[in-house]
């Protein structure tokens, strides 16, 4: 049959391109359709551009502290235009290498919008492609919120904000999830006045409550204003009234409250809320069609999408069942200090017997050397095994993987404590926090 492929993939974000590479490695013939830019939201409008700008804000923030470290710099300033251009260069370079990488595996990339004609037929650019299996990895876009419809001028989405090439003086951010918190930290580091409004009763509602409390303290320290249990009531001529009757007059509003799926046209998929419903092997109501990443709404993170992709290709090629547990996927909030968690929160453990230990990084020599003493490592254990970790600390984005390994491999705490942790490092806080489960931390005074 003409145009016959083992696997057709719609969407070239982290889920799509990872599935394409893995399937090609396993000997499948693969075709991938991307209507916009390879790399998806992650590379073009998410992880990479935001972290590129965030790194610049971190450099600027550290340089402002230089004198404290005995470094003379003279007056420090920044050019947001240069930062903006650098962000575009980074994205462009990574995009070119990604296309070469995917093509090096013999994957055919079609730059066009694809739709489904039948459960084994994809149509794009007026041609029909027959595919034995199909992966939908079409991702998500900023959710439309009534009364906060983006106009690209005063009310912006997380896509629009990346196109600003100069900074507002005064910014209002709606939502304190990862996106809202990261932009609050970026803009505040660049000396903008930032206010965050969160409908839940605490910042970062998906995190453990101790993280939310510490973030409140960090926001106060950075002079980021915030209102929890609050919503926008009305916007009248750029004057914003909140449900708690606060009146704000921001230059712009960033609406960072939720994302909705991008569902390809053609077939009638069963839904789970707004997202495509999948079973434990990520199959949709059509057995040969799988829905991965942001599209299935399980967890909107790039590494979760990649992990799902590898699992699904193994399922297609070897019928290896998938056991996806979203609590085992690390979450990271970037900025200074980094925030990360994996496994269970204390709230999830209510009703079962568990131990908790919180080790403050202020007890570490390394933290004093770096002047980064505001943070902690919190660990939770059940029956001698680590079940959750919640970290606010420099390098938290890397440290968290030590805990992910412990949890995934069900390591016992006494086995973990046989490992030698180098000094002086932030990893020592992991060792100390685990010792603390039995009140045996070496760097904390006797209770
Ligand atoms: C501001 C921001 C910051 C973020 N930061 C992080 C972070 O630090 N870490 C992290 O893990 N996650 C982060 N994320 C989330 C992350 O970007 C997503 O979870 C990830 O991109 C999802 O990957 P995906 O492959 O499911 O979909 P996407 O990356 O959304 O890719 C889907 C692709 O499908 C294409 N497509 C859609 N429909 C069609 C069609 N009909 N035909 C052809 N192509 C189609 C789209 O053009 C797109 O390229 C961030 C998101 C945002 C918005």
Image (tube, rainbow, N blue to C red):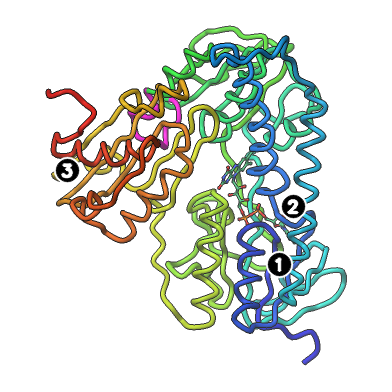
Residue under the point 66% across and 45% down:
141
Going by the image, does 134 lie left or right of 366?
Answer: right
Characterize the local packing of mark 1: few (<14), some (14-19) or many (20 or more) Cα atoms within 10 angstroms.
some
Mark 1 or 3, closer to the camera: 3
Label drawn at residue 354: 3
Which residue is tagged 2? 94
Q: Is residue 141 left or right of residue 80?
A: left
Q: Position of residue 311 (x, y in %)?
A: 49, 69
Task: Report x, y in % for residue 261.
Answer: 61, 51
Of label 2 and label 3, which has the lower sequence position? 2
Residue 436: x and y in percent read 20, 36
Rounded to the nearest angstrom, the CA distance separating label 2 from label 3 is 44 Å
Tell which of 99 and 314 is nearer to you: 99
Residue at 48% x, 83% y is 318
Residue 266 — which label? 1
Among the two numbered marks 1 and 3 on one chain, the one whose residue lies closer to the N terminus? 1
Find out whether residue 211 is within the magenta segment.
Answer: yes
Q: Are marks 2 and 3 in contact (CB under 8 Å)?
A: no
């Amino acid at each position: 049959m003409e145009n016959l492929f083992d696997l057709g993939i719609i969407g070239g974000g982290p889920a799509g391109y990872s599935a394409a590479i893995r399937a090609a490695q396993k000997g499948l013939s693969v075709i991938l359709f991307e209507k916009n830019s390879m790399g998806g939201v992650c590379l073009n409008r998410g992880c990479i551009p935001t972290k590129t700008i965030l790194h610049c804000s971190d450099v600027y923030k550290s340089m402002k502290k230089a004198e404290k470290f005995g470094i003379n710099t003279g007056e420090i300033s920044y050019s947001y235009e240069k930062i903006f251009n650098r962000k575009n260069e980074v994205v462009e370079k990574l995009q070119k290498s990604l296309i070469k990488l995917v093509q090096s595996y013999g994957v055919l990339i079609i730059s066009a919008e694809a739709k489904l004609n039948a459960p084994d037929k994809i149509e794009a650019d007026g041609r029909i492609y027959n595919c034995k299996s199909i992966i939908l990895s079409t991702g998500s876009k900023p959710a439309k919120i009534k009364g906060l419809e983006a106009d690209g001028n005063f009310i912006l989405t997380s896509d629009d904000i990346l196109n600003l090439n100069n900074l507002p003086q005064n910014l209002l951010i709606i939502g304190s999830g990862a996106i809202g918190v990261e932009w609050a930290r970026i803009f505040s580091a660049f000396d903008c006045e930032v206010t965050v409004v969160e409908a839940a009763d605490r910042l970062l509602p998906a995190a453990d409550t101790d993280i939310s409390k510490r973030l409140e303290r960090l926001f106060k320290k950075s002079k980021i204003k915030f209102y929890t249990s609050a919503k926008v009531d009305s916007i009248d001529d750029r004057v914003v009234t909140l449900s708690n009757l606060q009146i704000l007059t921001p230059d712009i509003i960033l609406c960072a409250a939720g994302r909705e799926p991008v569902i390809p046209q053609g077939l009638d998929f069963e839904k789970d809320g707004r997202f495509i419903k999948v079973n434990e092997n990520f199959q949709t109501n059509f057995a040969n069609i799988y829905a991965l990443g942001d599209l299935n709404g399980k967890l909107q993170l790039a590494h979760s999408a990649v992990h799902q992709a590898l699992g699904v290709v193994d399922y297609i090629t070897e019928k290896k069942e998938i056991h996806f547990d979203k609590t085992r996927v690390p979450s990271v909030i970037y900025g200074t200090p980094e925030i990360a968690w994996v496994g269970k929160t204390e709230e999830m453990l209510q009703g079962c017997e568990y131990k908790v230990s919180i080790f403050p990084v202020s007890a570490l020599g390394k933290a004093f050397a770096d002047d980064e003493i505001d943070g902690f490592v919190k660990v939770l254990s059940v029956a001698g095994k680590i079940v959750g970790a919640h970290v606010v600390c420099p390098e938290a984005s890397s440290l968290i993987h030590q805990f992910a390994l412990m949890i995934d491999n069900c390591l016992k705490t006494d086995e973990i404590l046989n490992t030698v942790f180098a000094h002086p490092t932030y990893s020592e806080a992991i060792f100390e926090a685990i010792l603390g489960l039995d009140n045996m931390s070496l760097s904390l005074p006797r209770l």
